[in-house]
Image: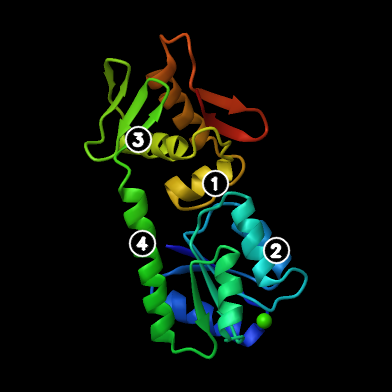
Amino acid sequence: MKILLVEDELKVNRFIKKGLEENGFFVEVAFDGLSGVRMACTGLYDLILLDIVLPKVSGLEVCQQIREAYQSVPILMLTALGTTEDKIRGLDTGADDYLTKPFHFEELLARIRALSRRNNLESDSVVELQVDDLIINLDSKEVARGPKGITLTLREFQLLELLARNKGRVLSRVVIAEKIWDQSFDSGSNVIDVYINYLRKKIDSGHDKKLLHTVVGMGYVLRE
Ligand code: CA
């Protein structure tokens, strides 16, 4: 699970990062609101820990901008401000939960677990993804285009699922590499292009209507 921590106080940032890493989380950090928004909008994170009082762009604004970019990632606000009004403002801008500093680390861990559970339950309630006549069953792992079944390898299935969950949205190679292979490839690697070609042959060849498209210089998109 990848967490983005946006916190400007160096000591607090280090403390939280270290604690989370000791509990098996992968953590990346930002020290101001501007880089916080930029990093959050890459879509690479499973959860965002967000301080409210930040340089450049405030946490409330960061939260708002993330939601305006249609990112549904869970956001947990961390702040020293603890009045009811502050909490409501935080939740109004699209935060999912709120934790007042100072807090016990165990409580932070409990909130993170609760948010990720909620998020997983929501995404797991979707059993079937559909793009035009292409149907992907997430339970049985069966894929079909029209009446014809398609056999995919595990990696191909994961790649197709990622593209279908983001139907109509262009995904860059970096995002695909991080989500499917859990690492960044060096830019010279063509692993993703190779897998895209395998997938394209299986789902598009023999069909007049193509679903998997290359957007030159940007990435790949699955669309009707
Ligand atoms: Ca701060």
The earlier-in-sequence mark between 2 and 3 is: 2
Q: Nearer the viewer, mark 4 or mark 3?
A: 4
Q: Which residue is mark 2?
A: 35
Residue type, mark 3 in image: Phe
The earlier-in-sequence mark between 2 and 1 is: 2
| Left-right relation of 207 to 12 | left
The earlier-in-sequence mark between 4 and 3 is: 4
- Residue 129 pos. (x, y %): 36, 34
Asked whether disc 1 touches disc 4, contact meaning CB atoms under 8 Å apart, the reply is: no
Residue 192 vs residue 87, the one in the foreground: 87
| Left-right relation of 42 to 180 | right
Identify the secondary structure beneath mark 3: helix
Q: Which residue is mark 3?
A: 157
Residue type, mark 1 in image: Val
Q: In the image, what residue occupies the spot 58% across and 26% down?
A: 214
Identify the secondary structure beneath mark 1: helix
- Residue 133 pos. (x, y %): 38, 20
Q: In the image, what residue occupies the spot 51% across and 43% down?
A: 176
In this picture, is 89 found above or below 160? Answer: below
The earlier-in-sequence mark between 3 and 1 is: 3
- Residue 48 pos. (x, y %): 53, 66
The earlier-in-sequence mark between 1 and 4 is: 4
Q: Which mark is residue 118?
A: 4
